[in-house]
Image (cartoon, rainbow, N blue to C red):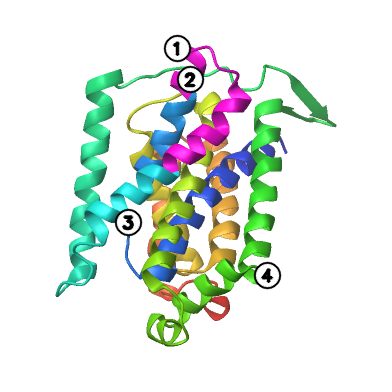
Amino acid sequence: MQQIANGLSTGMVYALIALGLTIVFGVLHVINFAHGEFYMIGALCSVLLTSRFGFPYVLTVPVAALAGAVTAVVADRVGVRPVLPQRDGHSLVLITTFAISMLLNESVLATVGPGPIPSPGIGSGVISIGPVALSTQRLLVIALGLALVVGLEIMLQTTRFGRSLRAVAQSAWAAEIVGIDVRRIGLLSFALAGLLAGLAGALVVPIVTFSAAMGQHAVINAFVIVVIGSMGNIVGAVVCGVALGIVESLSSIFMPTEVSSAIVYSLLLVALLVRPQGLFARRAR
């Protein structure tokens, strides 16, 4: 039960990262290799503001989310929009976003080093529920993650932006015919993805400590989640993200971390062979 509870908090972070990745794919139909670095930038902002400038941790969370969104917008302007209209533009985006990922990673390595850099979080308190003990930071991750997932679903279903985003995901041509600014929706989808990733980085960094390589590990897991859950499907990203966190946490009881990671990739291979369209393809939007 303790490992399931720990895995739930980790899985909620995975879900937030995968949500951004699947939103961008659903709207623009591109795979963004730089998405993990948005998560890393959010974690870095939180760490620097708390450890070097003395800001309260709670105040750094929205700043980290904003930093992730701004980084995503810059990446879209520099590495996605200029190449997307070209022939084989969707394939070129893979290369340009990979280059942006390397640029951000190497820049952080050159300025702050590889880490690890600790972050205080909201405190060292522990809350016990029966046999399960969770730190206040893990409880914050679970509670805020659930609130964000519910809020995102409400936004997609009830707001004008949400309806426009779903319309562009279904057919950009038809959406443009009825007056939706497709380019603006694409930019906002990138910003939303970066915001979710930056927020996830700020939430998890007090638990795992910061390192410049944390984004690369996160984006690999995010790809596993969105492929198994169906590319572009929000429900699949959340369910598979939480499930992956729990599976990783439970498997770490019986085997080394490297072996548990191999199990995750084995699940990906099985999913591609058995159901390549993803487990939630029928619910895709």
**Residue 48, quarter of the rendered image:** top left
Label 1 belongs to which residue?
A: 52
Residue 37 in percent (x, y) is at: 35, 41
Q: Determine the secondary structure under disc 4.
A: helix
Asked whether residue 76 is in view, the answer is: yes
Q: State the SS at label 1.
A: loop
Report the residue at 52% width, 73% height from top.
164
Residue type marked 3: Asn
Q: Which residue is mark 2?
A: 49
Q: Amino acid at mark 4?
A: Thr
Question: Pointers 1 and 2 in contact (CB under 8 A)?
Answer: yes
Whichever of labels 1 and 4 marks the residue nearer the N terminus, that label is 1
* Mark 4 neighbour density, 10 Å: few (under 14) some (14–19) many (20 or more): few
- Dot label at residue 127: none
Q: Residue 32, labelled with which disc? A: 3
- CA separation in Å, label 4 and label 3: 27 Å
Secondary element at image label 3: loop
